[in-house]
Image (cartoon, grey):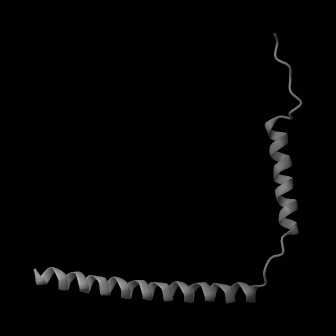
């Protein structure tokens, strides 16, 4: 039994269609304003810094507790 050719277009045609779809979807995207990007970036940086301080304090406290416990024995 011979193989029949499928109706599927070749890879280059499919790739070209996919690229067109991607660009048409990107045109529909509502991009945030520069001010909003700067504001949200600032919020993210402040939160990352706050978590870093909290985790560093916890790490320091646990290290001190471990040092205290190992010096007792």
Image quarter in which the N terminus is found = top right
Q: Quadrant of residue 66?
A: bottom left
Seen in the image, is 55 located left or right of residue 35? left
Image quarter in which the C terminus is found = bottom left
Vertically, is 12 above or below 43? above
Vertically, is 39 above or below 23? below
Q: Position of residue 65 (x, y in %)?
A: 25, 85
Q: Quadrant of residue 63?
A: bottom left
Seen in the image, is 44 located left or right of residue 61? right
Name the residue at 86% across, 35% down.
Answer: 9
Name the residue at 74% across, 89% down.
Answer: 35
Residue farthest to the left, as pictured? 73
Seen in the image, is 57 located left or right of residue 18? left
Q: Position of residue 56 (x, y in %)?
A: 38, 85
- Nearer to us in this view, 40 or 64: 64
Vertically, is 67 above or below 26? below
Residue farthest to the top, as pictured? 1
Disc tally is: 0
- Nearer to us in this view, 33 or 65: 65
Name the residue at 84% across, 60% down.
Answer: 23
Vertically, is 28 above or below 41? above
Q: Position of residue 32 (x, y in %)?
A: 78, 80
Seen in the image, is 67 located left or right of residue 34? left
């Amino acid at each position: 039994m011979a193989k029949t050719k499928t109706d599927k277009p070749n890879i280059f045609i499919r790739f070209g269609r996919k690229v067109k779809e991607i660009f048409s979807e990107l045109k529909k995207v509502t991009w945030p304003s520069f001010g909003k990007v700067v504001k949200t970036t600032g919020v993210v940086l402040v939160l990352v810094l706050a978590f870093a301080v909290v985790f560093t304090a916890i790490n320091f406290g646990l290290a001190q507790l471990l040092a205290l416990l190992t010096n007792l024995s």
